[in-house]
Amino acid sequence: MSLLDDLVVQTAVFPLLAGLIGVGLLRFAAGPARGRRLAAAGVAVAFLAAYALIVGVPALPPPSSMGRLFWSAVAGVVLGILADLAGLEPKRGSLLVGVWLTAALGWVAYPVLPGGLPTVTAAAVLVAGAWFALSRTVSHGAAGAATPGVVLLAAALGVGGVALVGASASVAQLAFALAAATGGLLLWNWPVEHHGWGTAGQAALGILVLLTAALTFFSSAPAEALVAVLPAFFADRLRDRLPLPDTSFGRAAGTVALTVIAVVPAVAAVGIALLLSAGTEASGY
């Protein structure tokens, strides 16, 4: 077995290194002005590389929902990069990503739509959650990538954990890979922030929403548990109440505190999934 066939390498080591390299290359290749916003695209690019390693590159047109997820992610990354290169303002970039994500959700969930009331309700909650997530992260576009990046990492861990409970090993592996790729960006931004969170960064968040959709509609994972991840998007408000000094040390400590606070809802989501799935078969991973 080659090193790249190892589960830990595919899920954690490879996407983390790909994220580190991708963020760095994009940051310096695009120059100081555009590179600050464009660097977050390295997260999504690293995820696509990890997807290709874990699952393989799907055919086009894709025969499955997971294949549609991959090509939707490609489209989102390209849109995000083009928007950042064009210098699109954060709110308009967020609207662009929102339109892409709504269309992508419909494409990924097409096999089960239209469905019964539970399916329609789940689709509506996903769309609402997606727009909520984008609106909560767009304000951090100019300030830096620490807050939205930490939230993405925590939420991806939560979705991956719920996927394990729901016996969806592929979604779990991809969600953990997205978290590791985000870690590559956060390592560049700690203890001092060097990179921002542009439209391509929001596209990476949209990829997590697509993974959540695949988990909701095509696995036995309890969809109710995923709602518990949403409080992670308010972790910055609790962090801002901490008595931290406005110094380099205080900002670095604030990022650590933010990570701990944001991970709590992710852990709660996994706990809820375990309670709701008691007696059912869990993933073999």
Image (spheres, rainbow, N blue to C red):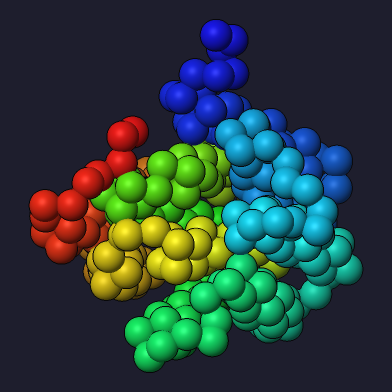
Rendering coords of residue 118 (x, y %): 35, 84
- At x 73%, y 46%, the residue is 58
Rendering coords of residue 228 (x, y %): 26, 69
Q: Is residue 154 above or below residue 4?
A: below
Can residue 1 be seen here? The reply is: yes
- At x 46%, y 57%, the residue is 152
- At x 58%, y 27%, the residue is 14
Image quarter of the N terminus = top right
Can residue 147 be seen here? The reply is: no
Would you identify the image quadrant in which residue 282 lies?
top left
Rendering coords of residue 172 (x, y %): 42, 45
Residue farthest along the bottom direction in this orientation? 117
Residue farthest along the top direction in this orientation? 1
Q: Is residue 85 above or below residue 191?
A: below
Image quarter of the C terminus = top left
* Camera-side residue of 268 and 193: 268
